Amino acid sequence: MSDTEYDRHMLEALICPVSQRPLEFDPERMELVSASARLAFPIRDGIPIMLVDEARKLDD
């Protein structure tokens, strides 16, 4: 599965491991964004990486 292929239903079911709130999918950056936790979790090879250590901190 490439970065452009994903299961949208699976992505919509995921929640932030920090805030326990829904994530927003950013198709341009291939990330799942948690506005409440100010983190963006990467999607690599179609797999969401839901580890806080791998997340990008969002700028203020």
Image: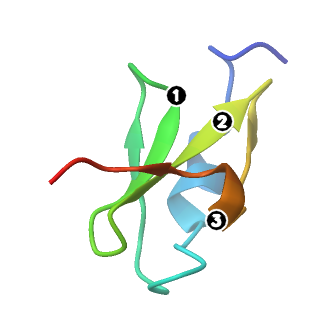
Where's the C terminus, which quadrant? bottom left
Identified at 50% across, 38% down, the residue is 31
Where's the N terminus, which quadrant? top right
Q: Which mark is residue 4?
A: none
Give neighbour class at mark 2: few <14, some 14-19, many 20+ (Cα, 10 Å): many
* Nearer the observer, 29 or 11: 29
What is the quadrant of residue 47 in the picture? top right
Identified at 68% across, 17% down, the residue is 3
Per the image, the residue denoted by label 3 is: 52
Identified at 69% across, 59% down, the residue is 53
- The amino acid type, in three-letter code, at marker 2 is Ile
Against 55, residue 28 (above or below) is above
Residue 52, position as x, y percentages in the image? 64, 65
- The amino acid type, in three-letter code, at marker 1 is Met
Give neighbour class at mark 1: few <14, some 14-19, many 20+ (Cα, 10 Å): some
Q: Could you tell me how far apart the alpha carbons at marks 3 and 2 are, in whole angstroms?
A: 13 Å
**Sequence-wise, which precedes: disc 1 or disc 2?**
1
Per the image, the residue denoted by label 1 is: 30
**Sequence-wise, which precedes: disc 1 or disc 3?**
1
Give neighbour class at mark 3: few <14, some 14-19, many 20+ (Cα, 10 Å): some
- Observer able to see residue 27: yes
- Observer able to see residue 50: no
* Nearer the observer, 40 or 20: 40
Identified at 80% across, 24% down, the residue is 45
* Residues under numbered marks 1 and 2 in contact, where contact means CB atoms less than 8 Å apart: yes
Between tags 1 and 3, which lies in front?
Answer: 3
Between tags 3 and 2, which lies in front?
Answer: 3
**Sequence-wise, which precedes: disc 3 or disc 2?**
2
Identify the secondary structure beneath mark 2.
strand
- The amino acid type, in three-letter code, at marker 3 is Val
Per the image, the residue denoted by label 2 is: 43
* Residues under numbered marks 1 and 3 in contact, where contact means CB atoms less than 8 Å apart: no
